[in-house]
Amino acid sequence: MSYCDYIKGLAHGEKDQHRTYHDNHYGFPIDDDNELFERLVLEINQAGLSWETILNKQSGFRSAYNNFDITTVASYGDEERTRLLNDAGIIRNRLKIDAAIHNANVILLLQKEFGSFKGWLDLHHPKTKEEWVKLFKKTFKFTGGEIVNEFLMSTGYLPGAHDEDCPIFCEIGKHNPKWMEK
């Protein structure tokens, strides 16, 4: 079942966080590096869990990770790691927390070299899913195939976020996602 079919099957008011994410965020291009970093961190944290768990904790993540300010997260040390490991508002997994901090530092380097994280992503577009996974595994921590696929679909770099008969599919087209470029 596709995410679109799942959303269609929900009763009005049921799991509204899914509907909001599906209708307003999933598959839409993101230009802001901090928002791209947020999506990467959320996708990493979803590994082994349901997306609903992540959506329910999204505001907790924003608070815990200083609104996903890349520079701030990159500067986290032992005190911040301990704080995050004790924060019930997020996923308290040392590997995922360490990956967020490491990946923030990597993004700072990419910003320096390519002007932005988005600039780095744009430079590498188009790639197949397999090529993207290889690049992400070489560049970042905790970025396996499903994480990379969902991150890139959810940010408009790979197709598949929405069924073609989904009204949101047409709406996303108005925003010129990278995967629609010829």
Image: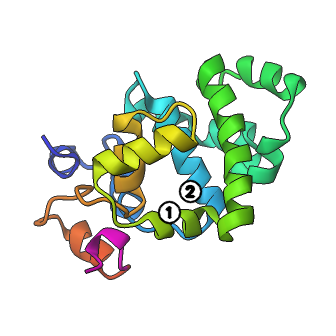
Q: Residue 167 in the image: state x and y as whole percent.
A: 20, 69
- Crowd tier of the residue under label 1, counting other residues whose Cα lies within 10 Å: few below 14, some 14–19, many 20 or above: some
Amino acid type of the residue tagged 1 in the rendering? Leu
Q: Which mark is residue 121?
A: 1
- Crowd tier of the residue under label 2, counting other residues whose Cα lies within 10 Å: few below 14, some 14–19, many 20 or above: many
Q: Residue 152 in the image: state x and y as whole percent.
A: 39, 54
Q: Are marks 1 and 2 in contact (CB under 8 Å)?
A: yes
Q: Name the element at disc 2.
A: helix
On the rendered structure, is 57 left or right of 60? left
On-image quarter of the N terminus: top left
Decide if residue 20 is in sight here: no
Amino acid type of the residue tagged 2 in the rendering? Leu
Residue where numbered disc 2 is placed: 36
Task: Write down the quadrant of residue 60 in the picture.
Answer: top right
Q: Residue 82 in the image: state x and y as whole percent.
A: 81, 19
Q: Name the element at disc 1.
A: helix
Q: Is residue 54 magenta?
A: no
Using the image as rendered, state which of residue 33 and residue 49 is in the foreground.
Answer: 33
Q: Residue at x 15, y 59 (%)?
A: 163
Using the image as rendered, state which of residue 17 and residue 42 is in the foreground.
Answer: 42
Residues at marks 1 and 2, CA–CA distance in whole angstroms: 10 Å
On the rendered structure, is 70 left or right of 176? right
Q: Nearer the viewer, mark 1 or mark 2?
A: 1
On-image quarter of the C terminus: bottom left
On the rendered structure, is 49 left or right of 78? left
Q: Total number of numbered labels?
A: 2
Magenta range: 176-182
